[in-house]
Image: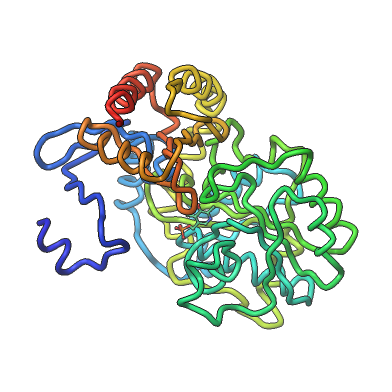
């Protein structure tokens, strides 16, 4: 299998981890040699309820027995998609009441950028340095990491950077600006949180200039930071909310949510302003609905903050300089990228899955399933301590 993986499947780096998967359950992934790996990464924040959560699997199986794809998005009334959009609206502020379902995070970002241009009649989009919003052309145009963009230029015009958490830069938001897009907590940059009421100041400047605020919650959303969406920590509400990753409980999905009035602009002038064949797919929507039901009917999200405390207590070691992030979106910061890589690879051998962050090489990504138990947290942190003690 390994040879065929390298030979036939396109690769993203010259050095994939190449763990050969047999099956996965709860907080563990099992490889084909029978070895068990404790998962502190959750498919990069995607497996919110762990692997193969029974409620999600059962929702998928029920739906598979009824119907799969029947029509392009938006034409037919399919219960899982309708119920998902409705439950989201019930759990969001009043202006975020209409959801457009797509297939991935980056596609949801594309939709949000198009919607902002359509709604304002303006073209300029601002984004933050070190931001990551996905890898299609539009999302890359608002990526704040030039080195990764250069090979693919020219990208979408009229997109300009600001510094995250920089109040002065907010003057760049003007009556020419359609939208500013920000991650509520910057992921790839190293789990950087907004400080000094930054998001309130962004909101205020947007209101002054008629600019839309797009918040990308593809990673922090769906409970990961101790609230259903991270913007709830910061006392503001975006005009467009973008989600994905953990929303699908392990299946591919993305969505953007706005007011009914704004979203309606995509259906006319031009008609079919945003279309997708598979967006809102019934099996995937059923999995996302089950995930959202589980999150909103239990105390999993509240427990996230207790689990953060446990992690912070156990992540004490002379090599760990700082633990960044919130809830179960944590980054243990080491001194150099070389040490971080050494630790991630050594942990893999010990049966603990850790991973890198996109633009911050010194970080150990710790984004486990929200369902991880206290014992599993202790077990993983112990393995990490063993590895850290071996670092030269
Ligand atoms: C904050 C953020 N935005 C957008 C994306 C892109 O999502 P996808 O990989 O589903 O296209 C990601 C994925 O890592 C992300 O973390």
Compared across the picture, whether 174 is left or right of 253 comes to: right
The C terminus lies in which quarter of the figure? top left
Q: Nearer the viewer, residue 204 or 270?
A: 204
- State the residue lying farthest toward the front: 392
Q: Quadrant of residue 138?
A: bottom right
- State the residue lying farthest toward the right: 208
Residue 86 in percent (x, y) is at 61, 48
Residue 269 in percent (x, y) is at 71, 82
Compared across the picture, whether 351 is left or right of 307 comes to: left
Compared across the picture, whether 55 is left or right of 288 comes to: left
Report whether residue 83 is seen. no
Who's the residue at 24% across and 33% down the image?
37
- Number of callouts: 0
Who's the residue at 35% across and 16% down the image?
375
Report whether residue 8 is seen. yes
Position of residue 18 relative to residue 147, above or below, is above
Position of residue 294 relative to residue 151, above or below, is above
Who's the residue at 62% across and 77% down the image?
273
Residue 26 in percent (x, y) is at 31, 31
The N terminus lies in which quarter of the figure? bottom left
Position of residue 9 relative to residue 290, above or below, is below
Who's the residue at 63% across and 64% down the image?
112
Q: Quadrant of residue 363?
A: top left
Q: Nearer the viewer, residue 300 or 318?
A: 318
Q: Quadrant of residue 256?
A: bottom right
Residue 285 in percent (x, y) is at 45, 52
Compared across the picture, whether 9 is left or right of 223 comes to: left
């Amino acid at each position: 299998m390994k040879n065929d993986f390298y030979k036939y499947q396109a690769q993203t780096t010259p050095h994939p981890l190449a763990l050969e998967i047999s099956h996965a359950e709860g907080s563990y992934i099992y490889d084909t040699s029978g070895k068990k790996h404790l998962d502190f990464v959750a498919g990069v924040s995607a497996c919110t309820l762990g692997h193969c959560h029974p409620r999600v699997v059962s929702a998928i199986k029920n739906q598979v027995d009824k119907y799969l794809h029947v029509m392009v998005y938006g034409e037919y009334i399919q219960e899982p998609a309708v119920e998902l959009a409705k439950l989201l609206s019930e759990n969001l502020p009043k202006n975020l009441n209409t959801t457009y379902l797509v297939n991935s995070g980056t596609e949801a970002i594309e939709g949000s950028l198009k919607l902002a241009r359509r709604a304002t009649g303006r073209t300029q989009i601002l984004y933050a340095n070190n931001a990551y919003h996905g890898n299609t052309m539009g999302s890359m145009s608002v990526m704040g990491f030039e080195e990764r963009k250069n090979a693919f230029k020219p990208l979408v015009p009229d997109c300009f950077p600001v510094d995250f958490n920089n109040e002065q830069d907010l003057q760049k938001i003007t009556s020419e600006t359609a939208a500013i897009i920000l991650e509520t907590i910057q992921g790839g940059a190293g789990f950087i949180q907004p400080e000094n009421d930054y998001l309130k100041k962004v909101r205020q400047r947007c209101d002054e200039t008629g600019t839309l605020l797009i918040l990308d919650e593809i990673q922090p959303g769906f409970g990961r930071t101790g609230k259903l969406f991270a913007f709830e920590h910061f006392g503001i509400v975006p005009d467009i909310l973008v989600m994905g990753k953990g929303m699908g409980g392990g299946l591919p999905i993305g969505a953007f949510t706005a007011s009914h009035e704004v979203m309606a602009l995509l259906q006319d002038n031009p008609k079919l302003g945003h279309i997708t064949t598979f967006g809102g797919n019934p099996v995937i929507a059923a999995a996302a609905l089950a995930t959202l039901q589980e999150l909103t009917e239990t105390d999993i999200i509240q427990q996230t903050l207790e689990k953060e405390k446990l992690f912070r207590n156990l992540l004490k070691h002379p090599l760990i300089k700082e633990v960044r992030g919130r809830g179960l979106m944590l980054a243990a910061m080491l001194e150099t990228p070389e040490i971080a890589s050494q630790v991630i690879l050594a942990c893999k051998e010990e049966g603990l899955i850790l991973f890198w962050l996109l633009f911050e090489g010194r970080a150990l990504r710790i984004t486990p399933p929200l369902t991880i138990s206290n014992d599993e947290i202790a077990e993983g942190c112990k393995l990490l301590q063993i590895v850290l003690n071996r670092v030269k």
